[in-house]
Image (cartoon, rainbow, N blue to C red):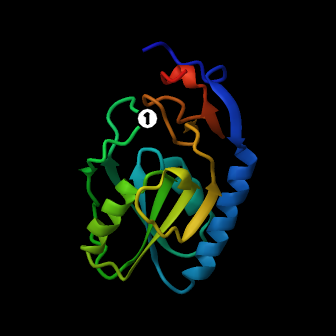
Amino acid sequence: MRTPDLSADVADVLVTAADIQTKVAELGATLSRDYAGRELTLVSVLKGALPFMADLMRQITIPVQIDLMEVSSYGGASTETSGLVRILKDLSSSIDGRDVLIVEDIIDTGLTLNYLMRYLRGKNPRSLKICALLDKPARRLVEIDIDYRGFTIPDRFVVGYGLDYGEFYRNLPFIGVLRPEVYGES
């Protein structure tokens, strides 16, 4: 694989860093209001959602706990889901009786999140909701109810703010569209 060029490989910026921070602040305020008087457990889906969860939890003004899961439906540098979902890292703590919010970077086909919702419901949380930074409904294969949504985006291959291609580009502060020639489409 060639060495990525973080600026040249991005065709255009879809969501700016400033827009992301504004939206994250709005989501944090909404969550603080909606869960007032309760404790909330944020479950980040690694690796892509980590920057979003880190920023989001700093905008929430109620007590929060965090946990991390790693779930995979992609293989290597693939841009398409395999349809096979695997849990690579499970929760560290029990969510029994807790208010749980899954924090996702992007919802694409919905297959991974659908699997994860069923899996976590089996752990008996008091409530289980979804907060996604990006929603790409054009690719949805299963219905997903997104309780808290950042941005709805078109069907383009995006990187940045945690999203990667081949484990690179996660550190970009914005959501950018990767040039097709970088990931093998022409």
- Residue at figure coordinates x 24%, y 73% from the top left: 122
| x then y, percent, for residue 58 | 59, 61
Left or right relative to 141: residue 96: left
Q: Is residue 136 visible?
A: no
Instruction: Give residue 79's quadrant in the image.
Output: top left
Outermost top residue: 2
- Residue at figure coordinates x 51%, y 24% from the top left: 185
Left or right relative to 102: residue 5: right
Q: Is 169 rendered above or below residue 66?
A: above
- Residue at figure coordinates x 25%, y 73% from the top left: 123
| x then y, percent, for residue 95 | 31, 73
| x then y, percent, for residue 127 | 40, 80
Task: Count neighbours of disc 1 (C-alpha within 10 A) and say few if under 14, some if 14 to 19, many if 20 or more.
Answer: some
Outermost bottom residue: 37
- Residue at figure coordinates x 58%, y 39% from the top left: 156
Left or right relative to 173: residue 39: left
Quadrant showing the C terminus = top right
Q: Is residue 72 visible?
A: yes
Quadrant showing the N terminus = top left
| x then y, percent, for residue 88 | 25, 47
Q: Is 97 rendered above or below residue 184?
A: below
* Three-letter amino acid code of the residue under disc 1: Thr
Residue located beneath label 1 in the image? 79
Left or right relative to 15: residue 120: left
Q: Is 89 rendered above or below residue 62?
A: above
Towards the viewer: 46 or 80: 80
Q: Secondary structure at mark 1?
A: loop
